[in-house]
């Protein structure tokens, strides 16, 4: 039972490049979320999805794009990476009627 | 903006001692959750307390909620070295969105 996985686990890229972070869950959870974690800020919500083809912005969406064509996948794309997007990114999922979220292991992204 | 703020930011104790972390939040809530994060890992759900509950227990964890003061506390009794981690409170908004505090870093020394 893989649960929720993220890939890659580590990524180094350059300013201006497009980067896609992948998230896959095997539970068929309705909700999926992307957070970023920076020192001193805890976790902040970037985007979330209530179901396939339904996505919406969170607290810090600028510079990011998401899609959800299948329930199990929720990729996060940085269209033109900036140094301020250097962070650890966590994907999470939850069931429709339950509030507990299950987190992936994270992707550490460095933008040079 | 963050909903919750944890206090203290860092806590260092000896094995066997109790650890208490506090969380304050700003708006009315349906429930509040606590998560643990081991270094370099994803978050793990610990416990959820609903707005109509005042106290909840799970193993060595005790959570209290005071909605009049908009605050919650997490008590870990008889701490172990394996409890060393960061602990976050989070309030739940619409569509199951979580708003996290900045967390408390707990170090338990053998």
Image: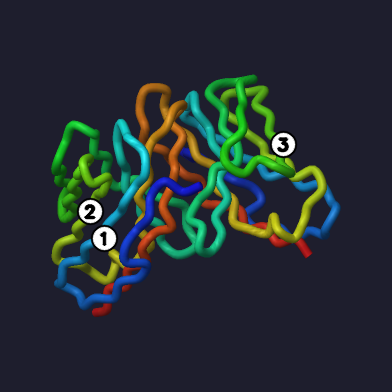
Q: Chain of mark 3?
A: A
* Residue A28 in view: no
Relative height, residue B104 to residue A75 (above, below): below
Residue A79 seen anywhere in this rendered image of the structure: yes
Foreground mark, 3 or 1, reads: 1
On the same chain: label 1 and label 2? Answer: yes
Residue A79 locus on image (x, y percent):
80, 43
Secondary structure beneath disc 1?
A: strand
Q: With respect to residue B81, does B35 lie above or below? A: above
The picture places residue A2, in percent across and down from the top left corner, at: 49, 40
Q: Position of residue A35 (x, y in %)?
A: 55, 45
Q: Which mark is residue B21?
A: 1
Q: Depth check: B24 or A48 in front?
A: B24
Cβ–Cβ under 8 Å for marks 1 and 2: yes
Crowd band around label 1 with a 10 angstrom C-alpha radius: few (<14), some (14–19), many (20+) = many
Where residue B18 sits, quadrant-wise, is bottom left
Residue drawn at x 36%, y 36% as measured from the top left: A100
Tell me the residue that label 3 is attached to.
A65
Chain for numbered disc 2: B
Q: Secondary structure at mark 2?
A: strand
């Amino acid at each position: 039972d893989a649960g929720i996985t993220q890939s890659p686990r580590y990524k180094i890229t350059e300013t201006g490049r497009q980067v896609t972070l992948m998230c896959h869950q095997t539970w068929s959870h309705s909700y999926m979320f992307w957070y970023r974690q920076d020192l001193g800020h805890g976790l902040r919500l970037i985007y979330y999805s209530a179901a396939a083809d339904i996505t919406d912005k969170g607290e810090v969406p600028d510079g990011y794009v998401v899609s959800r064509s299948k329930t199990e996948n929720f990729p996060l794309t940085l269209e033109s990476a900036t140094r301020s997007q250097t962070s650890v990114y966590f994907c999470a999922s939850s069931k429709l009627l339950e509030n507990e979220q299950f987190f992936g292991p994270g992707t550490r992204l460095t933008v040079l | 903006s963050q909903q919750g703020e944890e206090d203290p930011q860092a806590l260092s104790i000896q094995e066997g001692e109790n650890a208490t972390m506090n969380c304050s939040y700003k708006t009315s809530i349906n429930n509040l959750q606590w998560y643990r994060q081991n270094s370099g890992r994803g978050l793990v759900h610990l416990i959820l307390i609903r707005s109509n509950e005042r106290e909840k227990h799970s193993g060595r964890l005790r959570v209290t909620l005071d909605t009049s003061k908009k605050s919650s506390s997490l008590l870990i009794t008889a701490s172990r070295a394996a409890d060393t981690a960061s602990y976050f409170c989070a309030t739940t908004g619409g569509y199951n969105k979580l708003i996290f505090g900045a967390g408390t870093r707990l170090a338990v020394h053998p």
